[in-house]
Image (tube, rainbow, N blue to C red):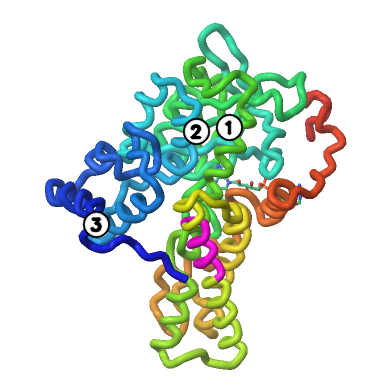
Amino acid sequence: MDLELPPQDDSRRLEVRAWLAAHPNPSGKDLAGAGYVVPHWPRPWGLDAEPMQQLIIDDELKKAGVQRPINPIGTGHCGPILVAHGTDQQKNRYIPPMLSGEEIWCQLFSEPEAGSDLANASTRAVGEGDVYIVNGQKTWTSLAHDAAFGILLARTNADVPKHAGISYFIVDMKSPGVEIQPIVDASGWHNFNNVFFTDVRVPASNLIGPENGGWELAKDTLANERVTLSRGGAQWGWGPTAQDLIDLVRDRGGAPDLVMRQKLAQLYIEGEILRVHGLRMVGAAITGGSAPAASVRKALADPHGRDIFRIAKDLAGPAGMLADSGPIGADAGWWAQGFVFSPALTIGGGTSEILRNVIGERILGLPRELEPDANKPWSETRRR
Ligand SMILES: Cc1cc2nc3c(=O)[nH]c(=O)nc-3n(C[C@H](O)[C@H](O)[C@H](O)COP(=O)(O)OP(=O)(O)OC[C@H]3O[C@@H](n4cnc5c(N)ncnc54)[C@H](O)[C@@H]3O)c2cc1C
């Protein structure tokens, strides 16, 4: 099963090529202006592109060696929320530099006591005239140190059930009172941070959607995140695939033993299931049909990605005990860092257990998880 793209002389291809000929080294701003960063978004930000047109644009940009600006949380998680729920003033101010990559975004959701149970957030935003005063702490905030703006979930009402008292804000990360402390992960990478808010003044015009209506937007953001995190390579769409590891082993003379051969065959099977699942999702989008959701893909892809790195480490043999070793004597490259990072794959963007809850409740229609305090005011149920 493979997806056949339209022929090389398809008029939609020729249009992209003509644009590329006129813009041989396009900047992020050029790509954003042409609608090529997010072709599936509505105009003027995208091109209202149907899925096949999107695939054609992806294919032509790839062939021309053109890379889109990298702003994963901006275009992947926050942007769609702004498009759907932002005011015109918010869209015009924030979307163009988000798409061009000039302003990086981060997502200020998780807290020390609110990760899987995000609705337990205790960061407070208290309205005072035309500003909200924000106090609290967020954690695991990827890219906060590079970000110009963040989307923030904060509690605006403690006297209603937890889901009903949360609002969704845009925060300028350079605001006085925002303190960013790096968290360096086990692989030595500084990607996420603790972010502290002390009397941070957030303009009321930065509220997205209604006050206390943030939970619905948060759920949409998490759904967008699952789509973003469920693409191709082993590390949330980036890095090597199972096929890359198998090719490497074959090129270097084959698997060292039968057990390893079994493991590689298993990786190949999983990789094929994911590839076909991806094609079904694209196919369903093209024909307007339905396909199992991105949560299913992420639930399969996360442990698969982790196992690619684990097996690559096993293939390094005793040399694998050294940090800078790759499988079967190959260069360490992405393999060494990926191995240490890979346990995070089944945690970030919703843990494997939470994904199974989502699949059980929203796809299979099974009874909801029991939450005895769900209807009590948050202030009475708050975990300490
Ligand atoms: C690489 C990485 C990047 C991240 N980037 C960001 C970011 O940019 N912004 C942001 O806001 N957050 C970010 N996070 C945080 C991430 O969203 C949380 O770590 C995740 O939601 C889990 O929350 P927690 O760590 O508090 O674990 P907990 O919620 O405390 O969970 C602990 C364990 O209990 C299990 N568990 C919890 N509740 C249930 C339940 N109801 N049923 C069954 N099992 C349950 C979990 O599956 C887990 O195994 C990132 C995390 C990682 C690893």
Count of all numbered marks drawn on residues in the image: 3
The residue indicated by pointer 1 is 217
The verdict on label 2 being within 8 Å of ligand 1 is no
The answer to which of 66 and 52 lies nearer the viewer is: 52
Please name the amino acid that badge 1 sits on.
Leu
The residue lying at 47 percent from left, 56 percent from top is 282
For the residues labelled 3 and 1, the Cα–Cα distance comes to 39 Å
Of marks 3 and 1, the one in the foreground: 3
Q: Is residue 64 above or below residue 243?
A: above
Query: What x and y, as percent, mark residue 48?
Result: 37, 39
Whether tag 2 and tag 1 are in contact, CB under 8 A, the answer is yes
**The magenta segment:** 273-282
Q: Quadrant of the C terminus?
A: top right
Would residue 286 appear left or right of 113 to someone viewing this image? Answer: left
Q: Is residue 321 visible?
A: no
For the residues labelled 3 and 2, the Cα–Cα distance comes to 33 Å
The residue indicated by pointer 2 is 81
Query: What x and y, as percent, mark residue 79?
Result: 44, 36
Would residue 21 appear left or right of 152 to someone viewing this image? Answer: left
Does label 3 or label 2 sit earlier along the sequence? 3
Does label 2 or label 1 sit earlier along the sequence? 2
